[in-house]
Amino acid sequence: MWAILGVMADRAEAPGTLDVESPAEIPLRVVVADDDVLLRAGVASLLSRSGFEVLGEAGDAAELLDLVRELVPDLVLVDIRMPPTQTTEGLEAASLIREQFPGVGILVLSAHVEVEHATTLLAEGRGIGYLLKSRVVDVSDFVDTVRRVARGGSVVDPALVQELFSARRRDDPLAALSPRESEVLALMAEGRSNAGIGQALWVTEGTVEKHVKSILQKLDLPETAADHRRVLAVITYLQAR
């Protein structure tokens, strides 16, 4: 009503001019997929009240794919674990959607931090999000996240970021080395002898030998007649870079 009154006032002040109202923003179209009926209905209701157009709901991956192919929404909200095996059906469906409809945003709501699955999903590019269900506690933040992903942004749950960094540290063979041992190994990779490393670091050759022995032990390089452990250590260093 206030908008109408405003238009009438403008026209009264400036007779003969045509005031054209800007068109209303087209609501973002969403499909919600989760085998938990209450959660699915709750998310769908929340999005509807927040201005989204919920095109449909799916309880399994096959139903989700059918809805997307028929309706082509702006965004899909999907759980990773869905029937019938409760393993990776949701993720596999998300990958198919990204392949067939690259413009459709995908927001995963997962009950668990699943690093491998999340990494695979995030590698798909823009318009991707990953949130833990337990951390969706602020309605306005959640709605904002849905909009950002639907419009091509990427959102990653902070808990997943922390886990990704932790996994990287666990998988890094050089993580166990001290800063000095890392320096020694880097100089080994340059082809320097123990004497040359000692000169570069201003330490004795005996100290370098102790560092090298510790490096080989920490990298779990066994003594063998066929392989030169220093070469294997350098290869490990180069592969980790």
Image (spheres, rainbow, N blue to C red):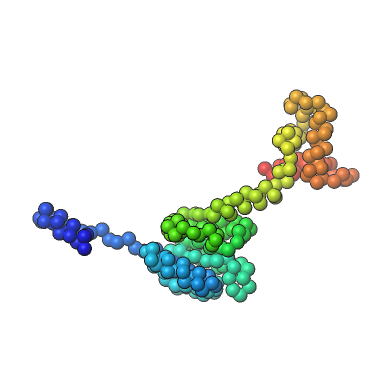
* Residue 46 on image: x %, y %: 42, 66
* Residue 21 on image: x %, y %: 23, 59
Number of labels in the image equals: 0
> Which quadrant, please, contains the N terminus?
bottom left
| 82 shown above or below 119 | below
> Which quadrant, please, contains the C terminus?
top right
Q: 55 or 4, which is in the foreground?
A: 4
Q: 171 or 48, which is in the foreground?
A: 48
* Residue 4 on image: x %, y %: 19, 61
Residue shown at 60% from the left, 59% from the top: 113
Residue shown at 82% from the left, 27% from the top: 205
Residue shown at 50% from the left, 72% from the top: 38
Q: 32 or 225, which is in the foreground?
A: 32
| 130 shown above or below 206 | below
Residue shown at 62% from the left, 71% from the top: 86
* Residue 150 visible: no
* Residue 50 lies in quadrant: bottom left
* Residue 144 visible: yes
* Residue 117 on image: x %, y %: 61, 60
Q: Among all residues in the image, which is located at the extreme front?
A: 137
